């Protein structure tokens, strides 16, 4: 039997999805179901002086109109804590509709519940709101003079600044210096399924929420705290989730609002956010600027890096995506200074968005590296090779595994990098200027901090069910877990079913930080191994078993049959053992305890990206012709799924590079393009020829399965490779994303 | 969504009569823009009269070599129609470069001509907008206006007309056929689109209940070698930053015939008459092309973020002329 891990198993949920049979959270059918619509503040700052709900309440089909006057108070004022911590994880330290203050445009100010979605929506427009508006800061440039350095960022997970060595001295003594400032437009996740919650109370202390989330347990714990109920009162179910990219990593207001509305009307409530509301309800990648200074010797060896970021955060939280953390350890570099600066603005707290931090921080570093290579006159790839670090430059510890050099080499071969003429503007095909660029990819390997659990049950027909409280939001985790369990149990994948998507199942931390598959995968592996070992112990201790008296360490399982490793003809199947002993099933609850954060290794994922672009010499249009990404993500559980994740990440990078920008109208204090018609993401016609490859790595330090994660690293470096290719094509450096054509006219 | 009543009619006179009788009513064809606008309360009819069963879907030959497109012909059917592709490739190309396949299967050509602007403030019922709420002001003037118009603007409105098809029809001097309570009319395409002036809410010279029944394409041999060029941020499913519809013949190195219209730049599909005047009879040279582009954009008015469109417009015109001249030479 060949191992299931690594094989290209089709998605176990694929059939249901393509048939339209998967049930998303806004599609749950319940008796007496009602529909809630959130009404949002239309000013960015101020106070509601009057809110007239009379006409709305009288409108046909309306059951209730809730505002700060009658919603009821929440039990606990939330404190932002990233869902990785495994605890309650509110997206911001604020809950709306508790008083008349408006902190940001889009803040919920009322909820209408009606018998149909159309009637609820229409009644929402009948609510008359008057505001006393206050001054608002919605752009970075409006608040630069009020910038401060926070003690901690990213929900308290990381310090606001860090340093090593003496960066001032090293920069002063550097033989070559590159200094540049990069600006980034705000970005929004735009998963195809807008967030939705359907809430139903079976009793005053029995609430079920069907929610689209990256972590059913996070939702359970957060809503419990906000409502002042014990976790046992709340069950969160997530049958299917239509993408997230970080927008569903934290627990935002809608599940709690749905629960409150359902309690108020005494009927189940469905609350589905609109596409427009997705721009103001689930966080975003913040508007930011990064200033980077690299000092190097004439041979390209980096001696110093100074990396500062300034970004806009909310009135409630010191949030900055951690743009400095991977850039700080990307290369050998003894002298370093990284400082975050924040400006408080009138916005929802920004949040995780695919490759949070790395997507922007590595863009800045890798564009500056390209400039350094040009300045010194060496090949950009060679510059990176000269600066590869075999240890974590911050801690001095060796990497648990790297593979970076192999990624560079493999990418260069696949791309044909070495044929490159380094001179900018050296290739032209008709109207098109052709250029190539490259960048390094780094993404940290995040470990959950609390134990990860799974349950495994083997039935006496030799089939097994594995359960864990993870949701399937498009990554393919249910499929990969089927493979992990199948291998550990020695069963064919079709004899294994993975069940997830509910807070009733064993506790798994929200799937964030590319750590979802490794967290649940480790728990599933440990649990399935424990179940297998228990069955083997039973067999060798059973006088009627052909394996009686055997050393359990010398027994293995092949296709459901426990056999002696050196005599595979001696053994019996799981089913035979259980039937003989009149056992209907065997079940274990397993726990994986993640390694401590201060392990003896530095742990990071590495990769290399290359891109070829064409730029219309007269019109400035940029099109990406091909991309090559080679990554070393540790164990690959399913080649097809991993490939899709990495390629999807690279195309995200393409979107970041060329298209994606949420535009603020500072006069109105709100986004001016909150629709998929106006916020452009790449379409198939923009997708180039993408080659994805992985470098094999064995990493036993990271977790028992050896997984480092594929969800986000594909994004990292893609935009920089494209921007560097644009420079190579045109001779022009791009310091602002996205690179729209007017910047090249 | 506001409560509405809905009815479906199967003959033109009932359709016209039903809508004409109720000031709060509107025709519903493909609905691809209209239903969106209904959902966001920008358009607020109380009654929709579904005209999809009317016999207006055909594409038929006109005596003398022209072609009549039924008002309800779907964008995709017209785009793929062999005669359209043969005689008026710019029409086919303009359709295929617009919207997405799904939308083109739904949307009618008459609806395409009638589509509303994409201006973010027009669609934001809380924002000032003279087109949606006359007299409230124009938020786009100093706002997020990267996609807005630089030609045909007024102090009241700078919204770009989004149609691609309309640009091709403008180059062809198509005629819009209507039928209303007062009978049938034929409206030259240039007159069918009104400049915003001080009344941006008025986009067409139609009376309430007047229905676009068809579009007549005149016989025009030069159109058989026409093209539609569209420059946009992404490769598909996106409106034009600049578009050019062009038909040109070159005889002995001189431009014998030129038809040029612009999209993405103006408040209506824009016939580039100033450029045509420069080009008519001029040598087909880079110098003529540049002078034509300069002449057409001479009156352009930028509004901040959209200033780049003036230069982009000129360069796209030159590109279209240069490429078409090269084709003519090699033909």
Image (spheres, coloured by chain):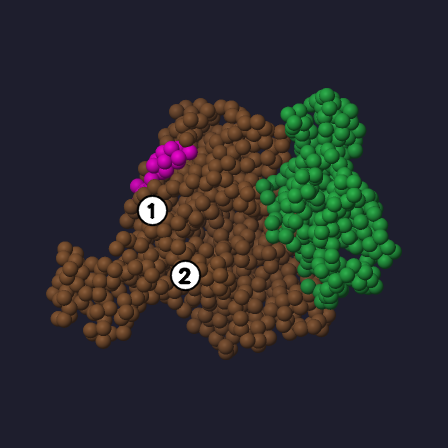
Q: Chain B is drawn in which colour?
A: green
Give me the chain letter of mark 2.
A
Residue at 49% in and 73% down:
A207
Instruction: Specify whether residue A423 is painted magenta.
Output: no
Return the x and y of residue A558 as percentages of the image width and height: 23, 59
- Range of magenta residues: A396-415
Query: Is A172 situated above or below B271?
Result: above
Residue at 53% in and 51% down:
A189
Q: Chain A is drawn in which colour?
A: brown
Quarter of the picture holding the N terminus of chain B? bottom right
Q: What element carries label 2?
A: loop
Query: Sequence-wise, which precedes: disc 2 or disc 1?
Result: 2
Query: Is B164 situated above or below B44?
Result: above
Return the x and y of residue A667 as percentages of the image width and height: 69, 48
| Camera-nearest residue between A343 and A279 | A279
Quadrant housing residue A658: top right
Q: Mark 2 points at which residue?
A: A470
Q: Name the residue under label 1.
A: A634
Mark 2: few, some, or many residues within 10 Å (few <14, many ≥20)? many
Query: Is B255 situated above or below A129?
Result: above
Q: Main secondary structure of the magenta part?
A: helix
Rounded to the nearest angstrom, the CA distance separating label 2 from label 1 is 21 Å
């Amino acid at each position: 039997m060949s191992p299931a891990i690594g094989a290209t198993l089709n998605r176990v949920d694929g059939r249901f999805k393509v048939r339209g049979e998967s049930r998303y959270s806004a599609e749950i059918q319940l008796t007496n179901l009602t529909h809630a619509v959130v009404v949002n503040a239309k000013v960015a700052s101020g106070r509601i002086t009057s809110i007239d709900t009379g006409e709305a309440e009288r409108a046909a089909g309306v059951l209730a109109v809730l505002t700060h006057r009658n919603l009821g108070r929440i039990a606990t004022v939330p404190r932002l804590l990233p869902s990785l911590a495994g605890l309650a994880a509110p997206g911001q330290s604020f809950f709306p509709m508790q008083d008349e203050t408006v902190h940001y445009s889009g803040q919920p100010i009322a909820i209408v519940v009606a018998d149909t979605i159309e009637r609820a929506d229409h009644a929402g427009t009948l609510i008359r709101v008057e505001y006393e508006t206050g001054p608002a800061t919605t752009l970075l440039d409006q608040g630069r003079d009020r910038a401060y350095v926070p003690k901690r960022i990213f929900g308290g997970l990381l310090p606001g600044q860090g340093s090593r060595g003496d960066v001032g001295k090293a920069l002063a003594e550097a033989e070559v210096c590159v200094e540049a400032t990069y600006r980034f437009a705000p970005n929004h996740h735009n998963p195809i399924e807008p967030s939705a919650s359907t809430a139903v109370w079976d009793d005053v202390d029995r609430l079920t929420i069907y929610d689209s989330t990256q972590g059913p347990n996070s939702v359970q714990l957060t809503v419990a705290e906000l409502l002042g109920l014990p976790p046992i009162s709340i069950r969160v179910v997530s049958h299917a989730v239509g993408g997230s990219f970080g927008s569903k990593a934290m627990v935002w207001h809608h599940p709690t609002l749905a629960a409150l509305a359902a309690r108020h009307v005494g009927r189940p409530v469905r609350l589905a956010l609109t596409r427009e509301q997705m721009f103001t309800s689930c966080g975003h990648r913040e508007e930011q600027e990064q200033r980077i200074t690299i000092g190097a010797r004439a041979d390209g060896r980096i001696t110093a890096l100074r990396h500062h970021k300034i970004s806009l955060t909310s009135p409630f939280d010191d949030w900055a995506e951690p743009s400095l953390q991977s850039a700080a350890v990307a290369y050998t570099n003894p002298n370093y200074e990284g400082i975050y600066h924040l400006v408080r603005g009138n916005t929802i707290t920004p949040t995780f968005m695919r490759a949070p931090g790395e997507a922007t921080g590595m863009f800045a570093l890798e564009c500056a590296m390209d400039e350094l290579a040009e300045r010194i006159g060496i090949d950009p790839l060679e510059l990176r090779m000269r600066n590869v670090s075999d240890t974590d430059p911050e801690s001095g510890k060796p990497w648990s595994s790297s593979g970076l050099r192999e990624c560079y080499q493999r990418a260069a071969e696949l791309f044909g990098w070495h044929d490159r003429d380094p001179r900018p503007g050296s290739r032209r095909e008709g109207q098109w200027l052709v250029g190539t660029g490259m960048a390094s990819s780094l993404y940290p390997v995040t470990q959950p901090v609390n134990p990860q659990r799974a349950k495994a049950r083997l039935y006496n027909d030799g089939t097994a069910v594995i359960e864990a409280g993870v949701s399937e939001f498009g990554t393919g985790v249910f499929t990969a877990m089927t493979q992990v369990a199948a291998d550990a149990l020695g069963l064919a994948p079709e004899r294994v079913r993975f069940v997830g998507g509910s807070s009733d199942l064993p506790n798994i931390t929200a799937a964030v930080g590319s750590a979802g598959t490794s967290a649940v995968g480790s728990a599933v592996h440990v649990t399935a191994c424990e179940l297998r070992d228990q069955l083997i112990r039973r067999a060798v201790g059973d006088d009627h078993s052909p394996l009686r008296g055997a050393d359990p360490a010398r027994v293995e399982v092949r296709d459901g049959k426990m056999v002696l490793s050196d005599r595979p003809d001696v053994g019996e199947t799981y089913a035979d053992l259980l039937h003989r002993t009149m056992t209907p099933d065997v079940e274990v609850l397993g726990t994986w305890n993640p390694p401590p954060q201060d392990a003896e290794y530095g742990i990071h994922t590495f990769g290399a990206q290359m891109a070829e672009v064409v730029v219309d010499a007269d019109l400035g249009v940029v099109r990406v012709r091909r991309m090559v990404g080679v990554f070393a993500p540790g164990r690959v559980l399913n080649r097809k799924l991993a490939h899709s994740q990495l390629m999807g990440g690279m195309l995200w990078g393409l979107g970041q590079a060329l298209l994606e920008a949420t535009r603020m109208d500072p006069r109105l204090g709100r986004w001016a393009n909150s629709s998929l018609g106006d916020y452009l993401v790449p379409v198939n016609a923009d997708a180039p020829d993408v080659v994805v490859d992985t470098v094999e790595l064995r990493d036993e330090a990271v977790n028992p399965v050896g997984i480092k994660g594929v969800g986000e690293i594909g994004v990292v470096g893609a935009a920089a490779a494209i921007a560097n290719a644009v420079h190579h094509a045109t001779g022009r450096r791009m310091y602002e994303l996205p690179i729209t054509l007017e910047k090249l006219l | 969504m506001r409560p509405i009543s809905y009815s479906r009619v199967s003959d033109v006179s009932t359709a016209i009569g039903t809508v004409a009788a109720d000031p709060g009513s509107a025709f519903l064809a493909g609905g691809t823009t209209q239903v969106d606008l209904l959902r966001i309360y920008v358009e607020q009819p109380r009654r929709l009269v579904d005209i999809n069963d009317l016999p207006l879907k055909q594409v038929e030959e006109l005596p003398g070599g022209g072609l009549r497109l039924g008002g309800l012909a779907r964008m995709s059917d017209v785009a793929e129609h062999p005669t359209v592709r043969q005689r008026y490739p710019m029409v086919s190309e303009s359709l295929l470069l617009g919207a997405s396949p799904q939308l083109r299967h739904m949307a009618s050509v008459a609806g395409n001509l009638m589509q509303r602007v994409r201006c973010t403030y027009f669609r934001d019922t809380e924002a000032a907008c003279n087109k949606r709420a006359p007299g409230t002001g124009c938020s786009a003037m100093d706002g997020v206006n990267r996609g807005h118009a630089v030609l045909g603007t007024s102090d009241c409105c700078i919204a770009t007309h989004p149609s691609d098809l309309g640009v091709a029809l403008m180059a062809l001097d198509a005629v819009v056929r209507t039928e209303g309570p007062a009978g049938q009319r034929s409206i030259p395409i240039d007159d069918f689109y009104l400049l915003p002036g001080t009344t941006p809410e008025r986009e067409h010279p139609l009376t309430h209940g007047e229905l676009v029944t068809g579009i007549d394409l005149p016989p025009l041999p030069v159109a058989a070698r026409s093209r539609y060029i569209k420059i946009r941020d992404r490769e598909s499913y996106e409106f034009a930053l600049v578009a050019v519809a062009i038909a040109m013949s070159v005889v002995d190195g001189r431009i014998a015939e030129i038809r040029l219209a612009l999209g993405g730049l103006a408040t209506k599909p824009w016939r580039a008459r100033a450029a045509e005047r420069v080009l008519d009879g001029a040598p087909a040279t880079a110098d003529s092309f540049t002078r034509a582009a300069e002449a057409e954009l001479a009156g352009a008015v930028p509004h901040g973020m959209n200033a780049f469109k003036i230069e982009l417009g000129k360069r796209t015109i030159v590109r279209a002329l240069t490429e078409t001249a090269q084709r003519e030479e090699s033909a």
